[in-house]
Image (cartoon, grey):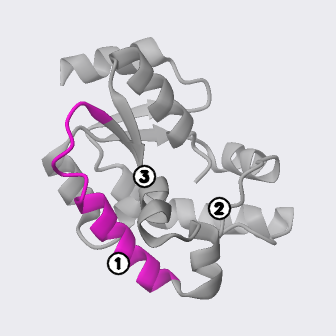
Amino acid sequence: MGAGKTTAARRLAQRMGWEVVDTDALFEEKYKISVCDFFNKYDEPLYRKLESEVLKETESLEHVVISTGGGTACYFDNMDWMNQHGLTVFLRISPKAVVDRLLHAKRKRPLAEGKSETELTEFVNQHYTSRLPFYEQAKITIKSEDLDLDNLLKLIEDE
């Protein structure tokens, strides 16, 4: 969350001449509800189950860069599945940078909504620590704060 996945995916897809697919947008289109509203109306376990199904519906897509939600890799067999069906990239970002981005974000984040800066810092640190083992399974890791798209493209070509 807040690492810049959607922006990086758009930029990368544009450079590669591919389409970009955002699993949150696919979820919202399929279920006719925003991710934020879904979290408020239902619960996270149901969201994660449906999110996993939406992710796996991307299997037949070709020449796409797929941007997932921050928690997608951490549930069910999603990270293994993504590694088997594509080239995964972990945008490494410091928890402090995430907090700064979330505090100034225009888009609502259901898991971060309504938290003070202190609560948000604690939340981000906790989530980062618990999610890091999943993220580190990605085939490519690159620094997100000042993403070097040329470097990322070279890493992708080398895979």
Give the residue displayed 45% in from the left and 34% down from the top. Answer: 9
In what quadrant of the picture does the N terminus appear? bottom right
Q: Is residue 116 above or below residue 55?
A: below
Q: As shown in the figure, which amino acid type bears the numbered disc 2? A: Val
Give the residue displayed 57% in from the left and 43% down from the top. Answer: 3
Element under disc 1: helix
- Residue assigned mark 1: 49
Q: As shown in the figure, which amino acid type bears the numbered disc 1? A: Lys
Total number of numbered discs in the rendering: 3
Residue 129 bears which disc, if any? none
Q: Is residue 40 above or below residue 32?
A: below
- Residue assigned mark 3: 68
Would you call the spot at circle 2 few (<14 residues within 10 Å), some (14-19), or many (20 or more)?
Answer: many
Q: Is residue 156 left or right of residue 71?
A: left
- Residue assigned mark 2: 124
Start and end of the magenta stretch? Answer: 44-64
In what quadrant of the picture does the C terminus appear? top left
Q: Please provide percent x and percent y for residue 91.
A: 47, 39
Mark 3 or mark 2: whose residue is earlier in sequence: 3
